[in-house]
Amino acid sequence: MQNPTDRWLANLERRHLADLTISEVARALRAVSSCYVERRSKLAAGGPLASAGKRAAFALFYGPLHFFVVRAIAREIPGARDALADIIDLGCGTGAAGAAWALEAGARRVTGFDRHPWALNEAVITYRDFGLRGLTHRRDISAPAATPSHSYRVSNATGILAAYAANELTDDGRAGLLANLLDARRRGARVLVIEPIAKRALPWWPRWASAFADAGGREDEWRFPANLPATQRTLALAAGLDPRELTARSLFL
């Protein structure tokens, strides 16, 4: 019998390689990676998800990478896996990051927020593949109405995740999200923020790190052996990416 992670990965391949070859997805992955590294102005406009090929590349490559990174980080941070009942995933994308934290913490419910309808549909499938009770909402995560502590009754059994999401917002949007996250912590939730490790793309990070430190939180940088499954390793090599190491930075309250 397949374990849930293998089943999820197999389902991703079956769906997203039904009409595309690995070579086609690899070409799209190069374009998606370019958006994140060289053309960050396209992120807010949905550039990484602008075509079927790019959506397949994001789902098949970045979704699993985010899953493995969040899973590894949750295993390392004291308190990140203790007695959580539900996860609220802000900027959930394909749902992979929120599912990873939920599985590590034994949470059975995940609520995902994103502004892209395709991503929300993928998140529903991800939650189902992992046997999680999942809900999704199309919402701008930087808006005051998206404050999870106002929309839901959060507690010390609630984990709120913002993985690879804050960096795609405007400066005003990030300020709104930071205020929302700090408010959620004051109401009892645990908060985990994860972003890429490259410093040049995150000029706002020191302010966030200071705010989390003032609230009693911690900041970390992570490097994990990649050990990627075959399909993700093939895509990475074909797209000219380095699959040997998974890196990230995190803030935790």
Image (tube, rainbow, N blue to C red):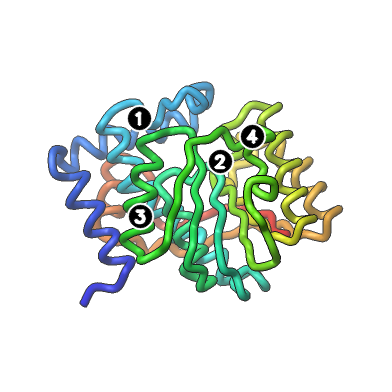
Report how far apart the C-alphas of labels 1 and 3 lie in the structure: 24 Å
Q: Nearer the viewer, mark 4 or mark 1?
A: 4
Q: Which mark is first along the chain, 3 or 1?
A: 1
Report how far apart the C-alphas of labels 4 and 3 lie in the structure: 24 Å
Where does the image place residue 250, in percent across and percent down from the top left? Answer: 64, 54
Where does the image place residue 44, in percent across and percent down from the top left? Answer: 52, 26
Which picture quadrant has residue 190? bottom right
The residue lying furthest to the right in this view is 214
Q: Are marks 2 and 4 in contact (CB under 8 Å)?
A: no
Q: Amino acid at mark 4?
A: Ser
Q: Which mark is first along the chain, 2 or 1?
A: 1
For mark 2, what is the residue?
A: 165
Q: Nearer the viewer, mark 2 or mark 4?
A: 4
For mark 4, what is the residue?
A: 142
224 left or right of 53 in image:
right
Report how far apart the C-alphas of labels 1 and 2 lie in the structure: 19 Å
For mark 1, what is the residue?
A: 31
Report how far apart the C-alphas of labels 2 and 4 lie in the structure: 10 Å
**Which quadrant of the rendered structure holds the C terminus?**
bottom right
For mark 3, what is the residue?
A: 126
Q: Nearer the viewer, residue 5 or 250?
A: 5
Where does the image place residue 96, in percent across and percent down from the top left? Answer: 42, 54
